[in-house]
Structure formats: structure tokens, C-alpha cells
Image (spheres, rainbow, N blue to C red):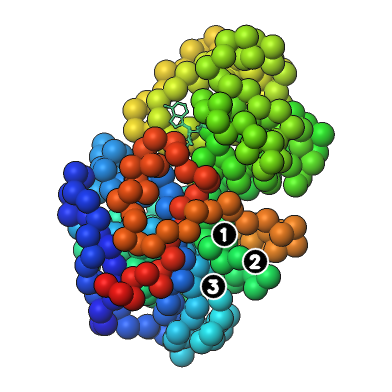
């Protein structure tokens, strides 16, 4: 074992503080990574505040972070894909059983014994896994991604969760070229959804509660913006969408959004509010609509997404912060005041 620097919280109501944690030495298949940037996902926030208590209770101390970009510092003897110096990424998962039907189908996120990057039982050290708000991490090479060298690294980090979480359902929906696609909530996930839908040729509309984000939505690639609190704007577009991606992190009126779909339209939820959403059967029956969900994406698909980003010069729009500003960043995340992802520069941890 060796010591790594990190920022942790001690309870659902505690602020982040500077901490020291144990990481395992690399085993045969492991890669040791010096973390350069880590994005701040709203899932980090839900977990830190124990908002998903009934489904995934948080074990403290908690060290979140699953949008990791770094450089390989050491590779185990059986590692074949990476060597010291390579730029790599780690997303929401660090292990799985490699053998179940989900793993065989390249959707490791649905493996019954997948290990998440933080707050998941740690098979090696006991306790729970610790995420990327740290200067170093050790990960099985099968869960390490190759990061394109032509992109800004601070903006690449969020691709490892916000990117793949929006890419996967959009690709799964089918060919969205020319289709009318809605992206609900212009935050970390939403702004990536807009970029991908636009790059894949869709007619993109953003639904936002924040009128101040309108200009940005258009700049990010939306053709249109609907202020979802404005009943007239909503009514004017009712029944017209083929596909809607809902990224909202809090309780909201899902039936109003289902009313925006046309015949056989689909709304896919990726947002994970802490309380259940109230779905009216009638919102689905009329127009034969469907409601589905999607959870991140498999490793193979994540690499495909990163390669697409390299080819199309796509990164997340980030506000780079030192780790010392993390408590302030969480306050702003709670107010939907992020343009459009915080990316922590881990060089700031060196001074702790
Ligand atoms: P984020 O950056 O905070 O963005 C969420 C956006 O939702 C906000 O910017 C805001 O957009 C909108 N919003 C927030 N509260 C709202 C409310 N009360 N009513 C209506 N709209 C509201 O969060 P994120 O990192 O993108 O994550 C979004 C959600 O996805 C979280 O619940 C997160 O846990 C979940 N998530 C799921 C997966 C998965 O695999 N399914 C992966 C990662 C994250 P506007 O200002 O534009 O209205
Ligand atoms: Zn995330």
C-alpha cells in the first residue's frame, strides 16, 4: 500500500477536507495513474449528501470523483494496453466479474458485481472504493480508457461520465439525423447531450428552467430553446419530439415532458432525482409513448465515444477549479450554476 492525497467528507453534512488515504500497490493487471483532472458530477453531490440513501447508502469517509484523466505512472507485469507516460481515463466503474451475460455483452455497468469507482465495496483493501478527488488511483487495465492526445485534458475528464451517459442513450435510440431531439436540463450531462445530438445531425431543442442559459444553449449547438416554466412555449411544441433525453437532477413534472413527444416518441431518463417521479399512465398511453432509463455505458462504448470526440474535436465546457474551491463548487452545483462542468486541477493538491 501507499499513501495518496485526497479530499473527503466525513458525513452528509460535512464540508470537504484535506485527507490522506491508502491505495493498493499495482497487481499484475493494474495501472497506477497520477490524476491530472477530475470532473465534478451531480452524482458525486447526491452521494456526498447521501441523497440516494434508500438505494445506495453512502459510507463515510467518502471520496467521490468518477471523471478521471491522468497519466500512467506504473503498469503491472501483465498489463498489455498501457505503459508509463500514457494519457488515460477512468469513469464510473473500476471492476466487474468479467463473466456474466452483461460483461460478455460489453455492458459491464449492469454486471451484478460491478465495482463503482467510489462508495463500492473494495475487493482489494476492504472498506469502500475511493474516487478521483485524489492525486493517484490504481485501476484494473480493463477499466482504463485511452485518452486522445489532441484534446484539452480538463475538458476531456467529464467525458468519462457526462459524456458516455448522454452518448449511450442517443446512440441506442438509433439514427437521430434529422430527428427532433430534446435535451432537458442544461448542466454537465445536458450540455454534452446537446453537443452529441448536434454532431450526429439531430434538430436539437434545449428545455431549461434557467432563462440565462439560452444564449449558451444556442452556442453549444441547440437550434431552439424552450423555457420549461413558460406554459405557452411548452404548448407550442407539444407532441412534436421524436426523442427526449431528461438529465434533471431533482424532482420535476415528467408528464409535461412526455406531452412534448409525438407518436411512438421516447423519453429516456438519465437524471437520478432522490425522490420517485410521478408518471401518469395517460401521458404514455396516448401516442404510444415510451419511458426508459440509461446508466452510463460500457467500456467499449466509452472508448468509441472518446474516439468520436477526438475526431470531432468535442470536449466538455469546463470551469477549472483548484481542489480548495470544492465546497464552493458544491454550493453552486446545488443552484444549477455551473458553466457547464467543474473540472478539478489536481496539481492544486500538491500544496496540501
Ligand atoms: P447538473 O450539472 O447539476 O445539471 C442538472 C440540471 O438539471 C441543472 O443544470 C438544471 O438545468 C436542471 N435542474 C436542476 N434542478 C432542477 C429542478 N428542480 N427542476 C428542473 N430542472 C432542474 O447535474 P449533472 O451532473 O448533469 O447530472 C444530472 C443528473 O444525472 C443527476 O441526477 C446525476 O446524478 C445523474 N447522472 C446519471 C447518470 C446515469 O448513468 N444515468 C450518470 C451521471 C449523472 P437548467 O438550469 O437548464 O434547468
Ligand atoms: Zn457522474
Q: Residue 277 is drawn in which quadrant? A: top left
Mark sitting on residue 88: 3
Residue 241 circle label: none
> Which residue lies most toward the right here?
178
**Image mark for residue 155:** 1
Disc 2 + disc 3, Cβ < 8 Å: no
**Residue sitting at x 52%, y 28%:** 210
What residue is shown with label 2?
151
At mark 2, the secondary structure is loop
Mark closest to the chain's N terminus, 2 or 3: 3
Q: Nearer the viewer, mark 3 or mark 1?
A: 1
* Disc 2 residue crowd, few under 14, some 14–19, many 20+, Cα 10 Å: some
Residue 53 visible: yes
Q: Name the quadrant of the C terminus.
A: bottom left
Quadrant (top left, top right, bottom left, bottom right) of the N terminus: bottom left
Q: Quadrant of residue 290?
A: top right
Position of residue 158 relative to residue 89, above or below, is: above
2 and 1 marks in contact (CB < 8 Å): yes
Residue 17, position as x, y percentages in the image: 22, 60
Residue farthest to the bottom? 77
> Label 2, label 3: how many angstroms apart (C-alpha)?
12 Å
| Badge 3 density bin: few <14, some 14–19, many ≥20, Cα 10 Å | many
Tell me, yes or no, if residue 29 can be seen here. no
Q: Residues within 10 Å of mark 1 (few under 14, many from 20)?
A: many
Q: Is residue 291 above or below residue 280?
A: below
Amino acid at each position: 500500500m501507499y499513501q495518496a492525497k485526497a479530499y473527503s467528507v466525513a458525513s452528509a453534512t460535512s464540508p470537504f477536507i484535506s485527507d490522506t488515504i491508502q491505495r493498493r500497490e499495482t497487481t499484475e493487471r493494474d495501472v497506477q495513474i497520477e490524476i491530472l483532472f477530475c470532473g465534478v458530477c451531480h452524482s458525486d453531490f447526491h452521494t456526498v449528501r447521501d441523497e440516494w440513501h434508500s438505494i445506495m447508502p453512502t459510507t463515510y469517509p467518502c471520496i467521490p470523483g468518477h471523471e478521471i484523466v491522468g497519466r500512467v505512472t506504473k503498469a503491472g507485469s501483465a498489463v498489455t494496453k498501457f505503459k508509463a507516460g500514457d494519457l488515460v481515463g477512468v469513469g464510473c466503474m473500476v471492476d466487474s466479474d468479467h463473466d456474466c451475460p452483461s460483461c460478455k455483452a460489453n455492458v459491464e455497468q449492469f454486471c451484478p458485481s460491478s465495482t463503482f469507482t467510489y462508495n463500492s465495496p473494495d475487493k482489494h483493501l476492504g472498506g469502500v472504493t475511493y474516487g478521483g478527488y485524489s492525486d493517484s488511483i490504481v485501476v484494473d487495465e480493463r477499466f482504463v480508457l485511452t485518452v486522445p492526445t489532441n484534446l484539452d485534458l480538463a475538458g476531456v475528464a467529464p467525458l468519462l461520465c457526462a459524456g458516455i451517459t448522454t452518448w449511450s442513450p442517443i446512440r441506442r435510440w438509433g439514427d437521430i439525423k434529422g430527428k427532433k431531439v430534446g435535451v432537458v436540463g442544461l448542466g454537465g450531462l445536458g450540455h454534452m447531450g446537446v453537443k452529441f445530438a448536434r454532431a450526429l445531425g439531430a434538430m436539437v431543442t434545449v428545455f431549461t428552467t434557467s432563462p440565462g442559459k439560452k444564449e449558451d444553449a444556442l452556442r453549444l449547438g441547440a437550434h431552439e430553446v424552450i423555457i420549461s416554466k413558460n406554459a405557452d412555449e411548452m404548448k407550442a411544441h407539444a407532441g412534436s419530439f421524436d426523442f427526449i433525453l431528461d438529465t434533471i437532477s431533482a424532482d420535476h413534472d415528467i408528464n409535461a415532458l412526455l406531452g412534448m413527444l409525438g407518436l411512438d416518441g421516447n423519453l429516456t431518463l438519465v437524471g437520478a432525482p432522490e425522490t420517485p417521479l410521478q408518471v401518469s399512465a395517460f401521458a404514455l398511453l396516448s401516442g404510444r409513448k415510451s419511458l426508459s432509463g440509461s446508466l452510463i455505458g460500457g467500456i467499449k462504448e466509452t472508448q468509441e465515444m472518446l474516439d468520436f470526440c477526438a475526431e470531432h474535436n468535442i470536449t466538455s465546457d469546463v470551469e477549472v477549479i483548484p481542489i480548495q474551491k470544492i465546497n464552493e463548487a458544491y454550493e453552486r452545483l446545488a443552484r444549477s450554476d455551473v458553466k457547464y462542468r467543474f473540472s478539478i486541477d489536481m496539481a492544486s493538491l500538491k500544496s496540501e
